[in-house]
Amino acid sequence: MGVLYILVVISLILAIGFLLTFIWFIKSGQMEDDYTPSIRILFENNTNQKKNKL
Amino acid sequence: MKKPEKYCTHCGERVNSNTIALKEKLFCCEGCKTVFEILNDNNLSTYYTNNTGFSPKKNKKYAFLSEQSIQEKLIDFKDENVTIIHLNIPKIHCSSCIWLLEHLYKIEEDIQSTRVNFSTKKLRIVYDHSKINLEQVVKLLARIGYEPRISMIDIEKSSTKKDLTLSYKIGIAGFCFGNVMLLSFPGYFQMDRFIFKDFHSFFGYLNFAFAIPSLFYSGFLYLESAWKGLRTKYINIDVPIALGMIVLFARSTFEVFSGFGEGYFDSLTGLVFFLLIGKYFQNLTYKSLSFERDYRSYFPLSAIRIKDKKEENISLNEIQNDDIILIRNQEIIPADSILIKGKATIDNSFVTGESKAINKKIGDTIYAGGRQIGEAITLKVIKTVSQSYLTQLWNHKTFSKKTSSIKSITDKISKNFTIAILSIATISAIYWWFEKPELAINVFTAVLIIACPCAIALSAPFSLGNTLRIFGRQKLYLKNTEVIEQMAEIDHIVFDKTGTITKTNSEAVEFIGDELSFEEKKAIFALVRNSYHPLSKAIYKTFSTCEGSEISNYKEISGKGIEGKILGNHFLLGSKSFLGVEDKHKEEQTQVWLKINQKIRGHFVFKNNYRPGLSTLIRQLKDYHLSLLSGDNSGESTTLSKWFNQESLYFNKSPKDKLNFIDTYQKENHHTIMMIGDGLNDAGALKQANIGIAVSEDVTHFSPACDGILEAGQLNKLPHFIQLAKQSLIIIRISFFISLLYNVTGLFFAVQGLLSPLIAAIIMPLSSISVIIFVSLSTNFLARKKFK
């Protein structure tokens, strides 16, 4: 059962990784607006724009 | 076949009175109209050339944005190539608006990108300042119908980044809580002690490690608040919470490091997490309204100063005494000044609430907050903004509102709670000291741990927060939850007259005299539409169904009347004295007399238009002491005594009188007063009252001194709001009782020394969750019953 030590530590590292991602994503301001992105996806021109740029 | 409701051709939303039309099709906003056109024309620039009549060359309204100092305050970021700025655009309201605004780069090449934040109605623009300047960007926005609102607040920005820290704290608290729970599970089931013993201490140390950030980072604000409270000898709700947390932590650390047990870290992290969730929920409710606006957001951002024959834009702060300033039509006077040149017709509706414009002669003092109607006038500043009359009224020392002279309900309970718990803990400890000494400390700490004030701390925010949101949905926006608690305690309601119980700008106009012919009505309409005088505007509105006729020789004599020639007939419309009418009656109502070709034709009389449902409203409020304060004359006395008692009617009250009235009642009769008013003139009174509610037609304009804003159409729901407030408090009391049950159960175990981490871990979250659910469900249920 000694393997449990290693397993717990590994899962902890993974969890901390997710925590850091969480902190990063709050910092980058994604949480400020949750309505506009849902509308923005539906704009057709955005994808066309990208195609033109290519 | 007339459709009762009009719908926007593009997005299908209901269209209100200011419709935008294109070839018989109606739209709710410029965005929708634009999208429709684009779908038809397939070419965005066609719309751009068909601008909506905003002539940029003549209009210098945004000239002040070229000022470097003002720009610097508004801009977020600037380097050699780009400038980034956030603008507040109130007109954003649908997905088409977002579409249009985010495609601005197509209309104007020099704008690189734009991004809308729908919930805050802000637009972030990135533009190349070497090719286009801020003034042009703003003009473009105004041209397409999305005029940004720039106010003093934006200039003296203080970024509210507080929300972010709470999110971090919740994230970390949740992270720690989840992991600690995972690691504590084996301890609950005590499976196979033989195996578990090895990991016992390992998990214990890990839990300890998790508890540290949870308590000292996420939970820090509770510790800090309790410490501050204790320093001022005031036991607030955070004291028992902080006490419980510290005891939890201390005992658990001791247990883990000495090997006696696993500790109660799971309860600790859970407690911190739930409390923070409660706080987040509370904040969510306040976000929709920003009450940080102070009075300066009403005043014009900048003014034009005339110095050495040059006109320059200066910001509000730079105005000094003796400056000569130029105020154009519809602009607001920024400081107390003397009129030097021009015809001043001042609309003081911001200040006095009365919309009748006052004519000023050269040499008269014009007070800040008034709005000039008519030609541009030149003024000399005599008192700068900080000293002006309005601020004086507000800086009156009766103003710093006695916040929480009535302690909020949670603080009252928390004090008793803490004392009770400490006594129980001490008594049980003493008891066990004599019976079985080693249990004494155990019991003492167990009592402190299990006695969870979390339900108490949560029920008030959740219940009041929910009520706040329900009120918001019914268009009553309150400043904070303390207002709800106050609402339940009022016994005296004071109403303002103009604008509160009357509808503004729709004064009913009646013509006394022989009925006017259609031709005469057309002529009068043609006459009044040239005039900005409020009485003319009222007549204009009444006759708005007529077409105008041609008019010549139009002349407006300020303060007296207007005249003109229509189809060969000479029309004269004005005050009694101007027309030379002799009438012995005491002038109680506003009258405007009409003369056609020098013959008196009759006069117009203006009646107050009361809001519908007023009598029902007053009837439902009969249990309260009601008063009416008005700045107007007593002409309406008879009409009003239908609803109010004669002795509760007070007329000709200045803003200061209103304030003193409320102050007197509070001091001498110990009334808890709710004042319902409409504008800046009530500001002092609104602040002095225990609760000040501002009634407004347009919810984005409000008086900063009030505790709440009520949309004018919802005034009739006032009794329901008060009742719901009272019921919310009852719900809170019930939830306290529920939490008491949990506490008693927990104490039952704790006092006997039987408290295991398992029991603590079950009872504490269970009590919090059940209280939250109960409180949310019952407030929603009650609200649904009231506001069907």
Image (cartoon, rainbow, N blue to C red):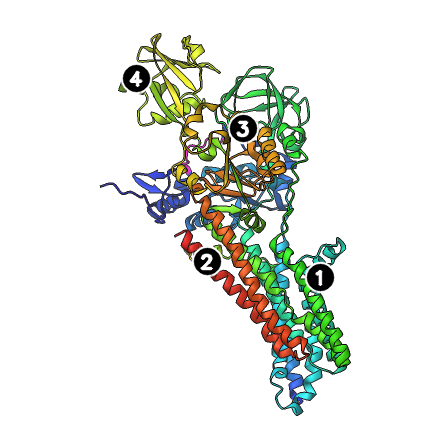
On what subunit does the disc labeled 2 rest? B
Q: Kindly identify the amino acid type of the residue bearing the numbered disc 1.
A: Leu
Secondary structure beneath dot 4 equals helix
- Quarter in which the N terminus of chain A is drawn: bottom right
Q: SS at mark 3?
A: loop
Residue B595 picture quarter: top left
Find out whether residue B215 is within the magenta segment.
Answer: no
Q: Nearer the viewer, mark 4 or mark 2?
A: 2
Nearer to me, B494 or B124: B494
Q: Label 3 marks which chain's residue?
A: B
Front residue of B732/B28: it is B732
Task: Identify the amino acid type marked 4.
Answer: Glu
What residue is shown with label 4?
A: B520
Give the residues in magenta.
B49-56
Q: Please tell me if label 4 and label 2 are on a single chain.
A: yes
The residue located at (61%, 82%) in the rendering is: B188
The residue beneath circle 3 is B352
Vertical comparison of B574 with B704: above or below: above
The residue beneath circle 1 is B223
Q: Is residue B514 above or below residue B430?
A: above
